[in-house]
Image (spheres, rainbow, N blue to C red):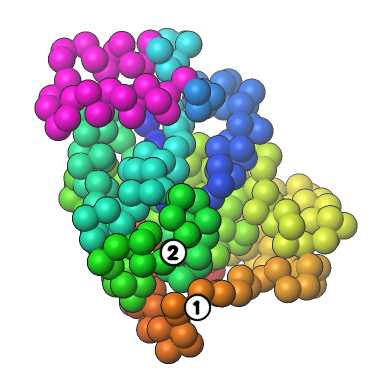
Amino acid sequence: MQIAYHIGAHSTDEDQLLKSTLRNVDMLAKNSIAVPGPGKYRSLIRSTIQGLDGAHPAPGTRDVLLDSIVESDDVHRLLLSNANFICIANRIFEHGVFYPQAETKTRAMRKLFPDDDLSFYLSICHPATFIQDALRRPKSTLLGEFMGIMHPEEVRWADVVRRIHTGTPDAELVVWCNEDAPIVWPQLIRQFMGLPQTAQVLGGLTPLTGLMEREGIDQLREQLNANPHISELERQTLIADYWEDNAIPETDEEEIDLPDLDEYAIAQITENYEADLTEIAAMDGVTLVLPFS
């Protein structure tokens, strides 16, 4: 079985990938692709991994889990999503490491499903934006308390991606930037669902909600529906053009308002983020989804 697991990160997706996928549940069922409700597997997989504590599961554990998650026996691809899979928000910087459990959690997932075709999907974003949003989630509201001994300039996505890949070197790892989601979303959800890029799907414009005027989104949808066989580059160009012409003012960029980060620190974080993207793009076994590429 193919198992595609969207594992976060925090402060990026807000379950948009899951919601877009669920809009296509009937078509997916006809193609033997299952997208169960998160209540069927999030706590189940988490508690199973915690109970094993790094050990190999008993024989038959995989089948027991699948029987609890999937209702039909005629499934060849299973779609899962949980932004808290690696850890809850309070533990993002535990032990002075950015997502310290990234490797152990993905390795544990491979142990649960040792013979399945496993793939992970990870959305990342500018570290300053990530930190600002993540600070709103845990009980601590002070940057120093939240990050511990880590400094914002030390937040490097390439290290997280490398450790995830180390945990499951035989699993496909697909990464994209949340800032690019409105442009690459149609490509991304088809890839996650395991459908060809020419497939007619719902939810391809979900990330544009709140960024574009509703009339512009409707016009864009009509254009895309009328031209289902255009190339991915043409589709992304069309989305970008409509977004530019119909953008809601002051929604294209998030203002960073952290007293602990001055303009020099943010400039350094931005430089590190760009370097991380170059490094991730060059990693074997990792696919970085970028617009217009």
Is any atom of residue 273 visible in this view? yes
Q: In the displayed structure, would residue 196 be above or below residue 78?
A: below
Labelled pair 2, 1 in contact (Cβ < 8 Å): no
Residue 178 spot, x, y in % from top left: 52, 60
User: What amino acid is found at the position of numbered circle 2 in the picture?
Assistant: Leu
Residue beneath label 1, please?
Answer: 259
The magenta segment = 40-67
Indicate whether 111 appears above or below 206: above
- Which numbered disc flags the more N-terminal residue, 2 or 1? 2
Main SS of residues in magenta: helix
Q: Is residue 134 left or right of residue 166?
A: right
Of 106 and 288, the residue lying toward us: 106
Q: Furthest residue to the right?
A: 215
* Mark 2 closeness class: few <14, some 14–19, many ≥20 residues within 10 Å: few
* Label annotation for residue 142: 2
Q: Quadrant of the N terminus?
A: top left
Structural distance between the alpha carbons of marks 2 and 1: 10 Å
> Of 276 and 94, which appears nearest the observer?
94
Q: Residue at x 13, y 25 (%)?
A: 56
